[in-house]
Amino acid sequence: MRYVKLPKENIYDFLERLKDYGKLYAPVKISEKFYDFREVDDVKKIEFHYNRTIMPPKKFFFLPREKMFEFSISKAEYKETIENVEPFVVFGLHACDIFALKIMDTIYLDEFPDKYYKVRREKGIIIGISCMPDEYCFCNLRETDFADDGFDLFLHELPDGYLVRVGTPIGHRIVDKSIKLFEEVTSQDICDFREFEKKREESFKYHEDWGSLRYLLELEMEHPMWDEQSELCLACGNCNTTCPTCRCYEVQDIPNLDGDTGVRIRRWDSCQLRSHGLVAGNHNFRPTKRSRFMNRYLCKNSYNEKLGLSYCVGCGRCTYFCPAGISFVKNLRTIMGLEDKSCPPEISEEIPKRGFAYGGAKQ
Amino acid sequence: MEKVRIGFYALTSCYGCQLQFAMMDEIVQLLDKANIECWFMVDRDSDEEREVDIAFIEGSVSTQEEIELIKKIREKAKIVIAVGSCAIHGGVQSWGKDKELEELWKTVYGDGRVKFEPKMAEPVENYIKVDYKLYGCPPEKKDFLYALGTFLIGSWPEDIDYPVCVECRLNGNPCILIEKGEPCLGPLTTAGCDARCPSFNIACIGCRGAVGYGVAWFDSLAREFKKKGLTKEEILERMRIFNAHNPKLEEMINKVFEEGE
C-alpha cells in the first residue's frame, strides 16, 4: 500500500480538488447535535470530528426511496428506470461505515447484483477518515475498527496533518493529480500515527470477548431482557433506518389513473414494523413487538460468511438514535452475562422450545 | 371498459378533504374513467340515492341524520372509503369526548337551535363497515391517486401501517424527539405525510391518527414523555387530539403512570 502525508494547511485545497471528481458529499452538522453526509459547497463546513451521521452512507448507493421500473399492464411490459449516475465523492467515512458498505456489497453485488445499487457503487469514490470513539462505539468488538480496504483513500489524523493510505487506482490518481499537496511520510509521522491508534484503542468503552454472543442469543430466547426491553420499544424503526447494514426494502406498485400504466417503487424497510413479517393469507412470521424486537438482535449478530464478521459493525447508531433510550450494547451484554444488574447467573435451565426462525411467538 | 361510479359524501367536517381532491389537476384524467354520481362540491347533478362502486365519506358522524345517511351509503356502495381524520378517528371534534354534549353545544352555539339532532362526534367505523382509509387532515393527494389507481386496475391498495418516523428518517431529518425532547407523536402516527411537520422542525401532532393493527405504542411513548417531565394530563391531552376514540389510549397511559418511577 502507498502512504503519503497531507499537511494540515493543505486539507482544504485537497477537499476543493475533490470536487473535480464529481459532487462532494461530507459530514456536516445538520442540527444542534446531529450530523449527516450532505453535498458540500463550502468545504470549511465539513466536520472532521463528527461522532456519527444520522443517515448511514449506504444512502448513496441503496437509496432511501427509489423508482425501480415503469410498467404497462395491457402491453405486459416493464422498463427499468436506472439512472445515469455521475461520479461522486463521499468524504469522511469512519472505518465502521466502510465495513458496512463491504457488508452491503456481499448482499447487493455478489451472486445477484442489484442493478440500482451497482450503478451507484461503481461511481462512488470513498474517502475514509480516522476517528476517536465515544461511549456508543464498539467497532473494536466487531473487528471493524480498522479498514484494510473498501476505500480509495483513508486519512489518519496526525498532529500536523493526515497520514493517507491509498487503497485503489482511483486513490493513486487523486494523489498524483494533486501531488504538490502531499509530502512523504516521515518517521515522526509514523510515531504520531502509532500514538493515535494506541490512544484510540484505549478509548473504547469495552475491551472484552464477544465470542459467546452468537450462541447465547439463540439459547437465551426466554431471557427476561426481551420482555423488559421490547416493552420500552416504540417500534418507530429508527434503529433500522439509521443502521449502515440494514438492507431490507419494501416494494409498492403505484398505478396511474389510466388503469394501465404505473411505477414500482421501493423504500427502506424496518423489521420493527408489522408488515415486515406479513405474508399472504394475513399470516405474520413475527406477530408481536417482542418477536420483531428480537429479530433485529438476531439478524445483526448473525454471521456474514464472506467477510467473517457479524452484520453489526458497532457504529452505535441504533442506540444513539433510539428515542426510547434502548441500549443495544447493554442488552447484548446482558445476554452474555456481562452486565451486573440483570445478567443471568448461568445459561437458563430450560432448553428453548423454539428455534431461531420461530423465536418469540410469545405475546 | 365500464366507467367506475364514484360518490363523495360529507358528514360533519370542514370539507377540507374533498376540497383537497376537488382541486387536483389529475381529476381531469378521471373523467373518461369514472362517473361522478354524487359529489356536491364538483357536480350540481348529484344524488345521494344512486348506487356507486366507490363511496368516499368525509367527516365525523355527529347527528342522527348522518347515521341514516352512512347506512344508506353502505347499502348502495361496493367499496366504502373513510376519508380524513374526522371520518376515520372522529376528528378534533372528538377531543372533548369526555365532556357532556350539552356543555359542548353551549360552548359553541349558546342557545342557538338547529333542525337536526346533535350527538357526540364519532368515527364512521362505529356504525358501518369501512373498507379502506385515506388518512390525514387533510389527506394526501398521492394517497387518493394511489387508492383510485389501484382500484381502477382491479386490485386492492395497501393500507399504511407504519409510523411517521420511517419517512422522517428516510428524509434525513434530525429527530426532534431525541434532540429537543419535544413531544413528537411521530412514533404513534400513521405515515404518508412524508413527515411534513418534523421536516419543518415542528413536532408531529398526530393529525393522521395512531397507526392501526395494535402497533401504536401509546405506553412506550408516554413513558418517554414522562421522563421528559410531562404530566399524565399533558400526555393524554396531546395524544387525544386526534385519537380520542382509540380504545388503547387511556389504558396504556394509565399503565405507565401506575408503574411508578
Image (cartoon, coloured by chain):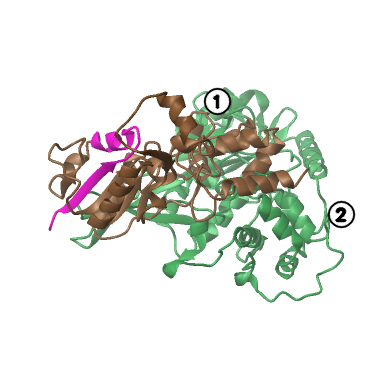
> Which region is colored magenta?
B2-24
Image coordinates for residue A40, horizontal then vertical, percent: 51, 29
What residue do we see at 18% from left, 61% from top?
A: A75
**Dot 1 and dot 2 within a common chain:** yes
What residue do we see at 28% from left, 55% from top?
A: B74
The three-letter amino acid code for the residue at tag 1 is: Val
Q: Is residue B39 above or below residue B51?
A: above
Q: Which chain is green?
A: A
Dot 2 falls on which chain?
A: A
Element type at mark 1: helix
Residue A220, image quadrant: bottom right
Image coordinates for residue B63, horizontal then vertical, percent: 35, 41
Upstream in the sequence, badge 1 or badge 2? Answer: 1
* Residue nearest the observer in this picture, A247 or B8: B8
Q: Is residue A155 visible?
A: no
The three-letter amino acid code for the residue at tag 2 is: Asp
Image coordinates for residue A189, horizontal then vertical, percent: 76, 35
The residue indicated by pointer 1 is A43
Estimate the spatial distance between the alpha carbons at disc 1 and disc 2, rounded to whole Å: 46 Å
Q: Tell me the shade of chain B.
A: brown
The residue indicated by pointer 2 is A340
- Count residues near mark 2 (Cα–Cα under 10 Å), then give few for <14, some for 14-19, many for 20+: few
* In the image: residue B139, left or right of residue A141: left
Q: Is residue A317 magenta?
A: no
